[in-house]
Amino acid sequence: METKKGFTSIDEYIGSFPEETQKILQEIRATIKAAAPDAEEKISYQMPTFFYNGNLVYFAAYAHHIGFYPSPSGISAFERQLKKYKHAKGSVQIPLDKPLPIALIEKIVAYRYQENEENAQNGKGRKRTAKCNQTPNDVAK
């Protein structure tokens, strides 16, 4: 693995890893895209990130595991299914030498997608509208 700073795309990030790790990262990416087709891909904190009405999920590759970051709510909602993986408040570690829990990743992403959608509708999340760029003075006009 080449350690590079300043990734500008998910393709660039994935391309910096060995071929076997690239396959795993592409599989996670495809799973996220399928579960959240309207989500925008970007790099945030030098990790692949999917954004939909706010940050949806992040993922990253390490020497022995994949880090998957669906926020604390994504972890707590699936705590029982995540018991066999090392996890913390907002992250889970998926060992590189074990099969990817694709169905579980898909469920977590779908959950977060719905959560972000509901938060946006209730005014709690980030909305991608012109109003987001307005100041309180602009809104008052």
Image (tube, rainbow, N blue to C red):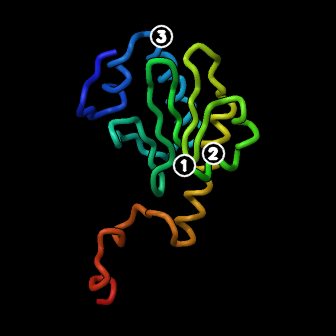
Q: Report the amino acid beneath label 2.
A: Ile
**From this viewpoint, which residue is outermost toward the right?**
80
Q: Which residue bears the numbered disc 3?
A: 20
Q: Which residue bears the numbered disc 1?
A: 71
Q: Report the amino acid beneath label 3.
A: Glu
Report x, y in % for residue 106: 64, 36
Report x, y in % for residue 87: 60, 37
Please identify the quarter of the rendering in which residue 61 is found: top left
Report x, y in % for residue 29: 50, 30
Report x, y in % for residue 129: 38, 65
| Mark 3 closeness class: few <14, some 14–19, many ≥20 residues within 10 Å | few
Q: Which residue bears the numbered disc 2?
A: 75
Q: Report the amino acid beneath label 1.
A: Ser
| Mark 1 closeness class: few <14, some 14–19, many ≥20 residues within 10 Å | some
Q: Which of the two labelled residues, at mark 3 and mark 2, occupies the earlier sequence position?
A: 3
Residue occupying image coordinates x 55% and y 17%:
96
Residue occupying image coordinates x 34% and y 26%:
13
